Amino acid sequence: MVNDEDAEYTVFLNDGSEHSAKVLASDPLNDIAILKIDAKDLPYLNFGDSDKLMPGQTAIAIGNPLLEFENSVSVGVVSGLGRSVVAGDRFGGFSEQLEGVIQTDAAINPGNSGGPLLNLNGEVIGVNVAVASAENIAFSIPANLVKQIFDSVKEHGKIVRAFLGIRYVQINEKMKEANNLSVDYGVLVSKGEKPEDLAVIPGSPADKAGLVENDIILEIDGKKLDGETSMARIISEKKVGDSIKLKMLSRGKEKTVTVRLEEMKNE
């Protein structure tokens, strides 16, 4: 987990040297941190295109399992794509929802987190992030998302994230029946548990576009929000300044709204 602001990091190279690492930026939403060490002429890996991955494709994991067996290599396949999982630390004090992750059966153990998942060309297709309690089930953050974060820090010196400005809950069949809704998919614009957790953040792109509490967003850019396709995932792939089209139900009437995304401010 990268949410510990007081943590200190050290990078160990194959030649035995140790380097203190500076945290340039961290993204607790995706459990990714960008580190920098003071060294030159280091070898590096290239990113592969994780959008082109197919189930059954060979996946190679490299890491330091159990913090004891450095540079361990395990081989498996891409078992699934677009998974949504809840990952937590070993002590149960923190958990997070990770969406759109890669599932693999390559052996990944505690200590492998942060290591690369590679294809047969030696390209990084994911960053290992979590393991399930069952055997042969592990998860990696897709390389395209990691590259987007890396490029943002390289260009801006920070993580620049597109922002819509709503809170919401996913609609399913159970929620439809309990609330007499007309649809069993989409997301319902809804306030949070605390009084300050408003459904639509004042001054946000959503607010400017006229979205209000209890609106139901059915599609984004033609992609149906059915639980398999996550709103958070779609927004995370957009850039600041992008315009998106929302197909929605507002007071029972269907309409399409165009929203121009803005930069998320520091939380």
Image (cartoon, rainbow, N blue to C red):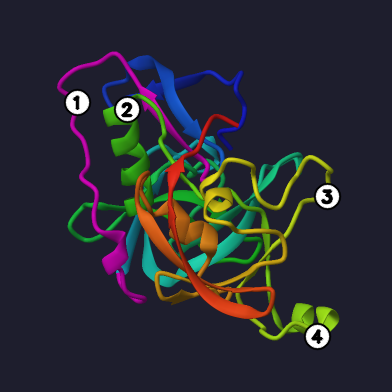
Give the spatial CA distance, label 2 vs label 1: 23 Å
Classify mark 3: residues with Cα within 10 Å, few (<14), some (14-19) or many (20+).
few
What is the number of the mark on residue 177? 4
* Mark 1 surroundings: few (<14), some (14-19) or many (≥20) residues within 10 A: few
Graded by Cα atoms within 10 Å as few (under 14), some (14 to 19) or many (20 or more), the crowding at tag 2 reads few
Which contiguous range is marked in magenta?
A: 30-57
Distance from Cα at disc 1 to Cα at disc 4: 58 Å
Position of 19 relative to 28 (above/below) = above
Pick whichever of labels 2 and 1 is earlier in the sequence.
Answer: 1
Give the residue pinned by disc 1.
42
Q: Amino acid at mark 3?
A: Glu
What is the chief secondary structure element of the magenta stretch?
loop
Which quarter shows the C terminus?
Answer: top right
Residue that mark 2 sits on: 156
Residue 57 location, quadrant: bottom left
**Disc 4 residue type (three-letter):** Glu
Residue at point 33%, 45% (across, down) = 148
User: What percent of the width, then of the height, locates residue 70?
Assistant: 41, 37
Mark 3 or mark 1, whichever is nearer to me:
3
Q: Residue 180, which numbered label?
A: none
Image: 27 above or below 182: above
Q: Disc 2, disc 1: CB below 8 Å?
A: no
Q: What amino acid is found at the position of numbered circle 2 in the picture? A: His
Q: Which residue is mark 3?
A: 193
Work out how far the residue at label 3 is from the one at label 1, CA to CA, in angstroms: 48 Å
The residue lying toward the viewer, choosing from 90 and 187, is 187
Give SS at disc 1: loop
